[in-house]
Amino acid sequence: MTSTSKTDLWPSCPQNFNLTAHVLSAVDRVPDKIALAVVKPTGAQRWSYDRLRRAVLGTATGLLESGLGPGDRLLMRVGNSVEFPVAYLAAIAVGIVPIPTSSQLTEAEVQVLVDITEPAAILHDGQTACPTTLRIIRTEQMAEWYGLPPADYTFGDPNRMAYIIFTSGTSGKPRAVCHAHRAIWARGMMMDGWYDLHDSDRLMHAGAFNWTYTLGTGLLDPWTKGATALIPAQGVDHAQIPLLLKRHEATIFAAAPGVYRNILKSGHLVLPKLRHSLSAGEKLPASIRDAWQDTTGTRVYEAFGMSECSTFISSAPGSPNLPAESLGWPQQGRRIAIMDDTGPVPIGTSGIIAVHRGDPGLMLGYLNQPDETDARYQGDWFLTGDMGEMTENKDILYHGRADDMMNAGGFRVSPLEVEAALLAYPDIQEVGVTDIEIKADTRVIAAYYVSDGPLDQAALDSFIAERLARYKQPRLYTRIASLPRNANNKLLRRALPDHPSL
């Protein structure tokens, strides 16, 4: 038996479709219901469904009146604020293509993204790092746009481009991942296959507005279902989240594994309304999963996905307990295979996790990179680059990355990008970068360099902070005599020391 899984079919996306219209379809049913609460210990900012739609469609009118039109690209340099999802949905509503970016990026990193995507304008909050080479639209204008007459949705082929997000490429250069309007339709497979989400739920996501994990799981999916989204306000730390979960009666909690680790440090948690929690972004360590269940009496359900495809493997309420290395099962409507160079491997054999090219959540491709897009396919299968194994029970065991890509708090980071930045440091002759485990369930990026003498870490930290976002920056630096290489002089990152000097 080969390692393929074909679940029941998922209904096809309507042929006349708009992502934003789909997300806001609950407004007519529950106009006065709270769609969003931005919460902090001292209070909350609340948005009803009707207010949310008026803000989105008024902003869409404002974007059109500013001179943008269908097909134009809008790079988003917006921090952790409600303007982010409002502008994102507003652009998609009228055919403008938003490009969300991490607020942590430096100006030089953002310029690389500008060069790749050639946006017509940049939406800027006035605070995040931003080049000034393009037309700037300030988010402060949006308050006036909320009261404008609502724009009409632009409906059309669900396969047309809706938005672009970035992922780190194995070459060290970021890749612009193009997604279609149908991507939101595919997220419906998660409602039962991961979330068990109902319109009565109050889902709190611990991430920032401008993280794609928060945007999808924390906002768009609850709104699609007619539920309430709860987002901690900027400045709320992880130790305050249990109070907010209890006070705002959250029924589902979503976060990356590191957030669960930090919250558990606070000790016993009393969360009477919490039904279960969700984890994604990186593999959830069994110790954290078990500690959360012991402390709260509720389970954490894990999901696996990537920038190129929405989460497609997961466990869900009602599913049996799984071994720590298992990711769960392919969701209803998903076709998954475990591949080697010849095709699907036998059950119980390790290979590359692959998604069928017909998956509605799969990307359209990398912007202006047809060869790089084609290289990710083997016949009808998109190769994720992650290793796995399908069991007789059809769940998927995770065996790590097939390449040297690193995971930094849920963000995939190419070591080549970090190495290129460090090689600009005058005294570094060679450098190799990888992620290492410094203690149980904690991984950091470490840099190993060759130089004539030891280098000052504070100087290295200052140098790299000007060139890379915080999540890409090494936490540890170690001088070594030489880098491990193979017979062809290729750097063997996996042969770098496991325990660098601290």
Image (cartoon, grey):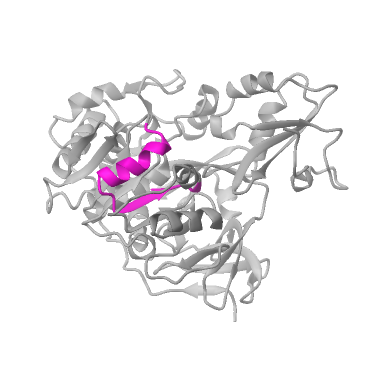
Q: Residue at x 38, y 75 (%)?
A: 8
Q: Is residue 278 above or below residue 338?
A: above
**Image x and y of residue 378, in percent:** 60, 63
Q: Where, quadrant-wise, is the N terminus in this rendering?
A: bottom right
Left or right placement of residue 405 versus residue 432 in this view: left
Q: Is residue 244 magenta?
A: yes
| 13, 478: nearer the viewer | 478
Q: Is residue 409 magenta?
A: no
**Image x and y of residue 430, in percent:** 79, 30
The range drawn in magenta is: 236-257
Q: Single out the residue that lies furthest toward the bottom.
A: 1
Q: Residue at x 38, y 42 (%)?
A: 206
**Image x and y of residue 176, in percent:** 50, 41
Q: Is residue 18 visible to us here? A: no
Left or right placement of residue 309 versus residue 20 in this view: right
Q: Is residue 70 above or below residue 310?
A: above
Q: Is residue 219 visible to us here? A: yes
Q: Where, quadrant-wise, is the C terminus in this rendering?
A: top right
